[in-house]
């Protein structure tokens, strides 16, 4: 990989966005749902009303202009009662190819259309169900999970939007010392043009629990808005891996705010794989709240045409003896763009922290652009922290070597992109999960 | 005269955008089934010739022809030359972290097949294992990332393995022997001999700086390159003469050309 200096272009500031057009009254009138859910969305909406969308003057939103998204111009999908339908063909195909699942939830537009969980896990107290169901049956688990998240100021507007207009989503609860041998898999499918789908992924793992989750976001090429918020709370000594596989069609704008919480000795992994959508923004924050915990954050993106990927990350070390590692890698072709802005924050008492942050970008075209802004804020004096970023082109010697074996330039570049991604792919814990991610990337890049 | 496997006529080449010619009129003819050794001091143009035959984009041909089975290949891209049957064993093979040898070789092997005829993972795996058995290589080798962290000997063995899998008509081996200790040299030489033994039509142009490899691989012809030209050609005994007398006696002859 040849490396060149990071060039950061100035974006012109834009005026504040005034956005009060969504009609919550119409949306919420006559909703037949558990009271806990209605209370949750009303509370969120009260906050939403008082907030403004951050403008590009806000540092974290400098390169993604929310005033152009038109949050208010999409029609929110109304929550509807969960139904039980057969899998859509696409879901069946994926499941047929990629192995066992502990549980499956399929959501179409705003509605959960299929939910199932391995009965032996249900017997052990595992919960994997729609948010509607969770609000009715497990309101205390729902509240506990949501309360664990502490959205930052610049996330508040979209966070509250996602809760106020929530439709669909799930809660996964894994009791103490229970282990999921296979991942749970959620599919969110949007097939209504002009729609706005807001949903949550809530994962609560008790002490010693283990599991993996795949969130898959799917649509055809349609104009739609997707707003997603996730909370993954790993209890003491829990092991949780969360994979978000975003393969929406072009025209979709996707916003995902993910809050990961690691308690004492917990091991949390997060993998964001961004392939689809026209605009995809991910705010991923990991708070290390217990000694001895370990957080690994990863992302892969492959951009083409004029796709725009923007990632903002936080590794917050609040306690000593914790480790966090972040590895975000993106490949960009055509005139696609990506932004990475990351912060490692080490609080005053968090001695003996190990924290690393790496962003690598591979540009496959002269028009593609990557911006990398890693940073550190360290207030403890006995820590090991490093951050780094590179932006480079395909290496000519590697390209010639592959072509000298008969690969066309395009085949050679694809293989080099896979090689570039492998460092992250190899860290995906379960082979069934890895196979699914690899297959999705192959579907995008071609083989 | 029949069509040669490789025929090079009055080839002149230079590094792109530079004035000085490195190849200054190379003539060479390699027939099917022949092993030619190309020797010469450092800087004589041997490796440049190998790269120009393979189509390295960093070199510019200013005159002459490179005919492969009668077709001029100079207008072809490196991948087209490879698929036509020309193989370059690199002096310094590139390291490609994250890409396994098996995946790379399957992509390369399938690039030679037409749409719909590609080998699936299992069919290719069988072929790869056959070739590895032929070369007495451990199966786990194929799972490693291409040349990533390889020793010099492993890199050269990997070149020979790729040659075995891709079954070229012509192998240009650019200093495949350099940097190897005697054990590694023996292993690599045995590999090359195994492949020439298995395919009696395979033509080899073995570029080397040292006579040592010719103790293991018997050439049909030996050529000496100096200052961008082939100044002497002969049989296997020419290598012995070079070993005994060095290149100085040719320097004078070269100067007279």
Image (cartoon, coloured by chain):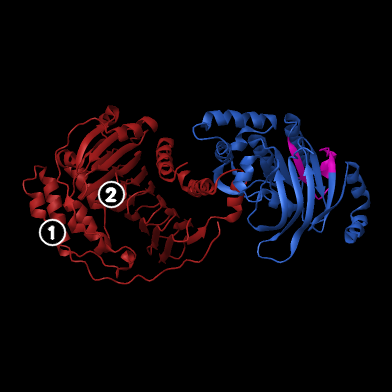
Chain colours: A red, B blue
- Note whether A392 is above or below A228 in the view shown: below
Residue that mark 1 sits on? A46
Q: Position of residue A437 (x, y in %)?
A: 40, 41
Task: Name the disc covering residue A230, or none.
Answer: 2
Q: Chain of mark 1?
A: A
Q: Which badge, 2 or 1, is on the more N-terminal residue?
A: 1
The Cα atoms of the two marked residues, 2 and 1, are separated by: 20 Å
Q: Is residue A256 left or right of residue A369?
A: left
Q: Is B101 on the left-hand or right-hand side of B241?
A: left
Secondary element type, mark 1:
helix
Q: Camera-side residue: A17 or B180?
A: A17
Q: Label 2 is found on which chain of the structure? A: A
Start-end of magenta stretch: B202-221
The reply to whether residue B211 is visible in this rendering is no
Residue B251 — which label?
Answer: none
Residue drawn at x 79%, y 44% is: B29
Q: Is residue A374 above or below residue A169?
A: below
């Amino acid at each position: 990989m040849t490396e060149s200096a990071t060039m950061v272009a100035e974006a012109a500031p834009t005026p504040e966005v005034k956005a009060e057009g969504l009609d919550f009254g119409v949306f919420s009138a006559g909703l037949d749902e558990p009271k806990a859910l209605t209370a949750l969305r009303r509370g969120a909406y009260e906050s939403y009303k008082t907030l403004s969308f951050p403008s590009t003057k806000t540092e974290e939103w400098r390169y993604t202009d929310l005033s152009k998204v038109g949050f208010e111009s999409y029609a929110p999908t109304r929550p509807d009662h969960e139904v039980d339908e057969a899998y859509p063909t696409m879901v069946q195909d994926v499941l047929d190819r990629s192995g066992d699942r502990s549980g499956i939830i399929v959501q179409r537009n705003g509605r959960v259309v299929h939910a199932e969980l391995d009965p032996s896990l249900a017997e052990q107290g595992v919960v994997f169900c729609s948010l509607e169901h969770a609000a009715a049956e497990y309101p205390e688990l729902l509240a506990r999970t949501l309360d664990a998240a502490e959205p930052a100021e610049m996330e508040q507007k979209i966070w509250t939007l996602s809760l106020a207009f929530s439709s669909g989503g799930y809660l996964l609860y894994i009791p103490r010392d229970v282990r999921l041998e296979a991942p749970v898999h959620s599919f969110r499918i949007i097939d209504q043009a002009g729609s706005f789908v807001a949903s949550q992924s809530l994962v609560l793992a008790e002490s010693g629990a283990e599991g993996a989750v795949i969130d898959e976001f799917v649509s055809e090429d349609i104009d739609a808005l997707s707003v997603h918020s996730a909370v993954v709370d790993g209890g003491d000594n829990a092991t949780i891996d969360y994979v978000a596989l975003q393969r929406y069609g072009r025209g979709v704008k996707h916003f995902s705010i993910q809050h990961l919480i690691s308690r004492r000795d917990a091991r949390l992994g997060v993998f964001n794989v961004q392939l689809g959508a026209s605009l995809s923004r991910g705010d991923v924050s990991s708070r290390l709240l217990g000694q001895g915990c370990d957080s690994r954050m990863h992302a892969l993106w492959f951009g083409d045409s004029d796709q725009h990927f923007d990632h903002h990350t936080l590794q917050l070390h609040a306690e000593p003896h914790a480790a966090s590692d972040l590895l975000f890698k993106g490949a960009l072709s055509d005139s696609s763009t990506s932004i990475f802005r990351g912060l490692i924050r080490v609080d005053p008492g968090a001695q003996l922290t190990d924290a690393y942050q790496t962003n690598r970008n591979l540009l496959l075209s002269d028009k593609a652009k990557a911006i990398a802004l890693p940073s550190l804020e360290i207030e403890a004096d006995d820590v090991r922290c490093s951050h780094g970023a590179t932006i480079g082109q395909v290496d000519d010697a590697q390209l010639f070597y592959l072509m000298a074996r008969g690969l066309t330039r395009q085949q050679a570049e694809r293989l080099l992109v896979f090689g570039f991604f492998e460092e992250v792919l190899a860290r995906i814990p379960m082979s069934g999960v890895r196979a699914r991610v690899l297959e999705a990337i192959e579907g995008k890049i071609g083989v | 005269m029949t069509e040669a496997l490789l025929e090079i006529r009055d080839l002149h080449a230079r590094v792109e955008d530079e004035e000085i010619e490195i190849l200054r009129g190379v003539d060479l003819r390699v027939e099917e089934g022949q092993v030619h050794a190309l020797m010469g001091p450092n800087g004589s143009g041997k490796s440049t010739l190998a790269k120009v035959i393979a189509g390295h984009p960093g070199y510019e041909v200013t005159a002459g022809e490179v005919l492969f089975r009668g077709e001029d290949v100079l207008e072809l891209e490196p991948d087209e030359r490879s698929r036509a049957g020309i193989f370059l064993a690199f002096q310094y093979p590139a390291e490609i972290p994250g890409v396994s040898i098996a995946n790379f070789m399957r992509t390369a092997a399938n690039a030679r097949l037409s749409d719909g005829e590609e080998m699936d993972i299992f069919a290719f795996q069988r072929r790869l294992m056959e070739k590895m058995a032929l070369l007495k290589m451990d199966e786990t080798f194929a799972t490693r990332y291409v040349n990533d962290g390889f020793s010099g000997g492993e890199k050269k063995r990997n070149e020979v393995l790729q040659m075995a899998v891709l079954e070229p008509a012509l192998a240009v081996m650019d200093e495949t022997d350099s940097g190897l200790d005697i054990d590694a040299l023996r292993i690599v030489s045995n590999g090359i001999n195994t492949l020439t033994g298995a395919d009696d039509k395979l033509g080899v142009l073995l570029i080397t700086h040292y006579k040592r490899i010719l103790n293991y691989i018997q050439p049909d012809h030996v050529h000496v390159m100096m200052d961008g030209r082939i100044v002497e050609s002969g049989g296997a005994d020419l290598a012995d003469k070079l070993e005994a007398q060095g290149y100085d006696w040719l320097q004078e002859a070269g100067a007279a050309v």
